[in-house]
Image (cartoon, helix red, strand yellow):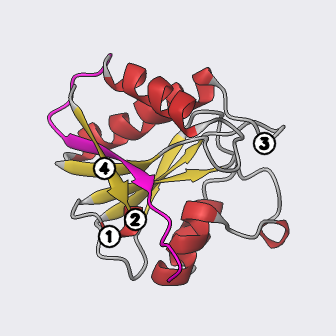
Amino acid sequence: MHVDIVDGDLLDQDVEVIVNAWNRNLFPAWLLIPQGVSGAIRKRGGREPFRDLRKHGLLPLGGAVETGAGSLPFKAIIHVAGINLLWTATKYSIQQSVRSAMEIIDGKGYRSVAFPVIGSGSGSRSREKAMAYMIEAFGTLNSGASARIVRYDRPTLA
């Protein structure tokens, strides 16, 4: 399966579905302050996706669930549990997150998806290593959907 790699903002991608690198939902919501991709989703899309997400309970490591997109212009958000209880992303958690998300995408018939670099934020994995794990996982899949990995391009201050 071919995957495009782009620089930019995940929330600005012209795709049907985005993926949110989340945790396992083990901690009460009031202990978690969404940061990174989750924080951007909450800021621009509202709290509804996270209310939906809580209904799913504990996510297995590498698991994925689909929620609505709140006020974002996507058909859905797929949340993946890409980090373990020690707040570390592993090869397994990253690759299983990719496979689990793509299983939902293919099962629902979505045609396009954008992924962040899973595990490179709170997961303490280098962006290069996390991307290599993701690309390896995509290489084992056969999907009709177009996929892209979005490397967050931090705005520069003038």
Q: SS at mark 2?
A: loop
Indicate whether 158 appears above or below 115.
Answer: below
Q: Is residue 103 left or right of residue 50?
A: left
Judge depth for marks 4 and 1 and give the one in front. 4
- The type of residue carrying mark 1 is Asp
Find the distance from the CA under tag 3 to the CA under tag 1.
Answer: 27 Å
Q: Nearer the viewer, residue 38 or 63?
A: 38
- The type of residue carrying mark 2 is Asp
Crowding at label 2, few (<14), some or many (≥20) Cα neighbours within 10 Å?
some
Q: Which residue is mark 4?
A: 6
Q: Is residue 64 left or right of residue 73?
A: right
Residue 110 visible? The answer is no
Identify the residue shown where x is 18% and y is 40%. 145
Determine which of the numbered discs, if any, sits on residue 12 in the image. Answer: 1
- The type of residue carrying mark 3 is Trp
Q: Which residue is mark 3?
A: 87
Determine which of the numbered discs, if any, sits on residue 9 in the image. Answer: 2
Q: Position of residue 66 (x, y in %)?
A: 44, 54
Find the distance from the CA under tag 2 to the CA under tag 3.
Answer: 23 Å
Crowding at label 4, few (<14), some or many (≥20) Cα neighbours within 10 Å?
some
Find the distance from the CA under tag 4 to the CA under tag 3.
Answer: 26 Å
Disc 4 and disc 3 in contact, CB within 8 angstroms: no
User: Between disc 4 and disc 3, whose residue precedes?
Assistant: 4
User: Between disc 3 and disc 1, whose residue precedes?
Assistant: 1
Q: Position of residue 68 (x, y in %)?
A: 41, 68
Disc 2 and disc 1 in contact, CB within 8 angstroms: yes
Q: SS at mark 1?
A: helix
Magenta span contains residue 150: yes
